[in-house]
Amino acid sequence: MSILLSLITAAAFGTGDFFGGMSAKRMSVLQVVGGSHFIGLIGVFIAAVLIDNTFIASEFALGALGGAFGGIGVGLLYRGLSRGPMSVVAPLTAVTSAAVPALWGILSGERFSALGWAGLALAFVAIWLTSTSGNNSDTPVTVQVVVEALLAGAGFGSLFIVLDLTQDSGAPWPVVGARLLTSTVLISWLLFHRQPVFAKDRVGFGLVVLTGLFDTGSNVLFLYALQVADLTVVSVLSSLYPIATVLLARAVLDERMNRLQLIGFVVALTATAMIASG
């Protein structure tokens, strides 16, 4: 169950990224993130009220802290992707977002069998391969690009760690705190600069709504996956999200998958089986 929930989380993360990328072709990145986080805030707030879990102020505050880390990660990731090359920025960010919480989990005393360790190591290889675009680019790989990609991954990884520190009884209120912080900051910035929060066309608005629902939903799923599995396993398997993004790009946009990505899919399946067995 824990492996399946982690993989579903990865699928939700990847789907949110796909719709986010589609949205960014129609509006600014700040509009995409601000608008989608506001939509996600509405959705997760309604879910939290319906679930009626215990509201704990400290858990809500932890979620807001995690949202700050995640917001920094998103900003640095989009900045890095815009300055390229994407074939370097994306895999570095994905691997780091898995490595940071995995290291935290190991230092916190999480233990695995030899087969489980091998599966985790193989999963990192799969994350790199599946998130590599393979596109040729004349954009140089500067130290700044590498550092920002690593910091973006660290931001996402720190969000995962903070979510792991919350209590099970408070879910999904920490995600409400995270989305409240980021949406408030970003929307305030847009309004201050007299920029629209949402796209005027229906397609653009629909893409932002889908981005918000899947992106925020993935954070909620991550929170529940932590209730049945260790942080290391959940964070590594959830970081296989590029698989969902690539598959959607293939199905919707008819983008071709390169050889490295196809190999990455096979490696990911192997790694998942090893982790489940270990």
Image (cartoon, rainbow, N blue to C red):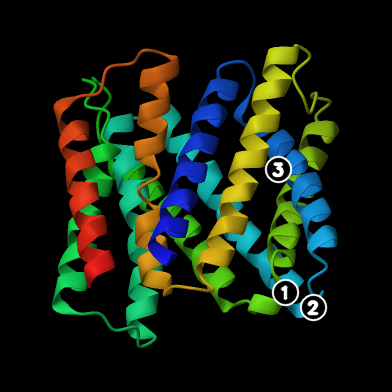
State the separation of the CA atoms marked 3 and 1.
20 Å
In the rendered image, the quadrant that contains the N terminus is: bottom left
Residue that label 2 marks: 56
Residue 209 lies, with reference to residue 39, above or below; the image says above
Tell me the SS state at disc 1: helix
Q: Residues within 10 Å of mark 3 (few under 14, many from 20)?
A: many
State the separation of the CA atoms marked 1 and 2.
6 Å
Amino acid on which disc 2 is placed: Ile
In the rendered image, the quadrant that contains the C terminus is: bottom left
Which residue occupies 33% across, 39% down? 89
The answer to whether residue 100 is left or right of residue 35 is left
Q: Position of residue 222 (x, y in %)?
A: 53, 60
Q: Nearer the viewer, mark 3 or mark 1?
A: 1
Residue that label 1 marks: 170
Q: Position of residue 224 (x, y in %)?
A: 57, 65
Residue that label 3 marks: 37
Tell me the SS state at disc 3: helix
Tell me the SS state at disc 2: loop
Q: Nearer the viewer, mark 2 or mark 3?
A: 2
User: 220 or 138: which is nearer to us?
Assistant: 220
Q: Residues within 10 Å of mark 2 (few under 14, many from 20)?
A: some
| Earlier-in-chain disc, 3 versus 1 | 3
User: 4 or 268: which is nearer to us?
Assistant: 4
Q: Position of residue 194 (x, y in %)?
A: 84, 26
State whether residue 83 appears in this view.
no
Amino acid on which disc 1 is placed: Gly
Label 1–label 2 contact, CB within 8 A: yes
Amino acid on which disc 3 is placed: His
Residue 238 lies, with reference to residue 228, above or below; the image says above
The answer to whether residue 194 is left or right of residue 160 is right
| Earlier-in-chain disc, 2 versus 3 | 3
